[in-house]
Amino acid sequence: MLHALIDRIYWRLRHRHMPDDIPAGTLMSFVIDRTVQALRGQILGLPYVKGPAVHFRGRGVKVRNAAKLHIGTGVVFGDGVAIDAHSAHGVTIGDRTTVGRGSSINGSGVISEPGVGVVIGEGVAVGMYNVIWGQGGITIGDNAMIGPHVSIFSEDHEFADMSVPMNRQGFIRSPTVIGADTWLGAGSVVTRGVTIGEGAIVGSGSVVTKDVAPYTIVGGVPAKLIKAREHTAG
């Protein structure tokens, strides 16, 4: 009965079921950890949690400009996550999204140059040690999967005038869009202004410099088309 109760709660919060064969000790350890994270989230998350949303917050999480951070229910921040929501539109994170250990999400680069911000949809898995820079605006669609050590950018430095240091030449900003139900492999990099279409897959270690068509698989440096995804009947 305990397993069934925990499964119902987990489904309500995360839209996932507990495996039937999970050992009792493992299950109880998970419940204890999540309870502590939920308490931490409700207390330390007061500056940014709006309404009755349940929020799980790991150890060492740092949130700056919390008034500009908006999160849904069932959101999980892993240990050491850093979020700076300073930007025109702030940082929005949808229901049931997980931000993995050590990841960094920034609405702007520096306080003197406010960026556009970041919008992350529902059910997104942001992997461990991701870096997401929203200066030019970043949107990540529902149910996207982003592997560990992925970097997503929306700004470049100007560099045309060699008589002026590059850090004084200004910026080029363009919105970057990661479509719904996409999968970005470990260590991949997405550059400024790229749109990755719905259902696309980016191979591990790839550098994406151009738009990726929906339901295609790309890989390499720079990333190129490998093949289109094919529908397979279940």
Image: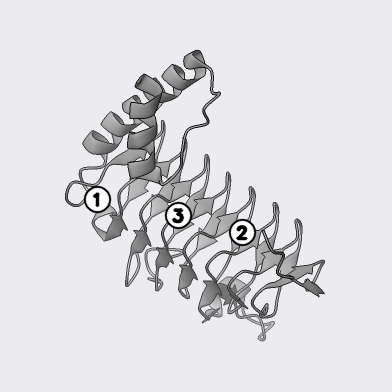
Give the residue drawn at x 38%, y 28%: 4
**Quarter location, residue 123:** bottom left
Which of the two marks, 1 or 3, is nearer to us in this view? Answer: 3
Horizontal side, residue 139 vs residue 53: left or right: right
**Quarter location, residue 72:** bottom left
Amino acid under label 1? Tyr
First of labels 2, 1 by sequence position? 1
Amino acid under label 2? Ser
Q: Is residue 156 visible?
A: yes
Residue at the outermost front position = 234
**Mark seen at residue 151:** 2
Provide the residue designation for mark 3: 123
What's the CA distance linking mark 2 and mark 3? 19 Å
Which of the two marks, 2 or 3, is nearer to us in this view? Answer: 3
Provide the residue designation for mark 1: 48
Could you tell me which secondary element the residue under label 1 belongs to?
loop
Residue closest to the eye, 97 or 101? 97
Q: Residues within 10 Å of mark 3 (few under 14, many from 20)?
A: many
The location of residue 200, given as percent across then percent down, is 66, 69
Q: Residues within 10 Å of mark 2 (few under 14, many from 20)?
A: many
The location of residue 158, given as percent across then percent down, is 60, 80
Residue closest to the eye, 154 or 31? 31
Could you tell me which secondary element the residue under label 3 belongs to?
loop
Placement of the N terminus among the 4 image quadrants: top left
